[in-house]
Image (cartoon, helix red, strand yellow):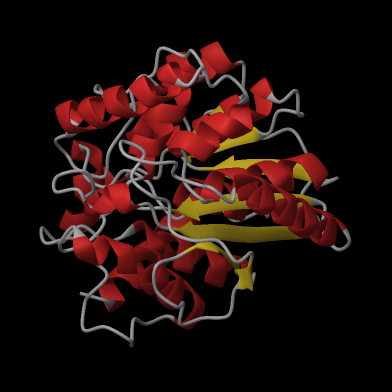
Amino acid sequence: MGFLSEKPPFPCNRPVFCCILANTLLSTVPGVSGAGPSPEKTLLTPILDAELIATGAITSYPIKPNTPTGCPTPATITRAMMTLCNIPPLFINAGLRHTPTVPCYDVYGCAGEDPRFRDALPQVKDLYHRGEAIGTLLSQYSDLLVIGECVPGGTTTALCVLRALGYSASVSSSFADNPVSIKEDICSAALLRISSDGIKDPLDIVRYTGDPMMPVALGMIKSYTGNLILAGGTQMLAVAALSRALNFRMPYVVTTCYVRNDSTANVQHLAEQIRVRISYVDPEFGNIGHPGLARYCIGEVKEGFGAGGAMCLAHLLGHSPEEIRNLILSTVNAYS
């Protein structure tokens, strides 16, 4: 395939790139998430990544934007694309455990609880309505909204939601070795609660087992009047599936080829089940000349913080694949 498997079929004159930041306590379960140096520190990842994208540096915590193996965080890719496009990113605090260090729209949510034992999001309807308000606001001055997310542990909440909606879903992971058995055990426990209580309504499913990003994104989909891209893999497919269940319009999904190529996930088949259009970005990191970026090709990290959608947006704005790759390389080299 080329740089984009399919070009989104709409103009891009006044785009907004936003990222929804949230926590789920599932990320603190050992082995669930690779988005942090330890399970507990995954709760800091959305804040540190947003700081990197907004300011070009992580200053509030002594850490480099790389995994222990030297694989650059996808936030460095998104940072490069915001610089290339000269677009100031917008952050939404949907429910963080810690106070963010960069300005955010705040919808006054809380971190998602562990769905094995209690409702994950008691505030689900409040978060949904506040997402609606943001979508209405952004409609005033943009014609394309690209929504990314940073929710460590979010592929596990996505698995729970997709299965509860009746989809045959397997989800990806930031780990090269997907911790499938851990996710399946969590999902089984969450689905048992849902089944025992006879939960069918989509927003109630999110209340039982989702994360704060989901209802905020759904509210934005409902009210935003321009074209809309969900930038992410299986987590955004879960949002698309919820949009389908609620009879909302279907957004366009963009992710990286590294998510599609994950043999432990069924991304393309899942998109077909949901009946949502999906496009894949192939930045050819295997040939870019950086050993850390090349690790994306063996399944490490794969996607995150809207990186695939950010690269797609840069391409829609007229930047060539070469420009995009060159700036990503120079950006990650600056953090080496």
- 124 or 180: nearer the eye? 124
Q: Residue furthest left?
A: 69
Q: Residue furthest bottom?
A: 59
Q: Position of residue 52 (x, y in %)?
A: 40, 75
* Residue 97 visible, this angle: yes
Left or right of 163 in this view: 133 = right
* Residue 6 visible, this angle: no
Q: Position of residue 112 (x, y in %)?
A: 43, 51
Q: Residue at x 67, y 22 (%)?
A: 244
Up the image or down, 172 lies above or below 335; here it is above
Count of numbered labels shown in the rendering: 0
Q: Residue furthest right?
A: 140
- 254 or 212: nearer the eye? 212
Q: Position of residue 131 (x, y in %)?
A: 70, 53
Quarter holding the N terminus?
Answer: top left
Left or right of 324 in this view: 37 = left
Up the image or down, 193 lies above or below 153; here it is above
Q: Residue at x 42, y 34 (%)?
A: 158
Q: Residue at x 41, y 56 (%)?
A: 325
Q: Position of residue 187 (x, y in %)?
A: 31, 27
Quarter holding the C terminus?
Answer: bottom left
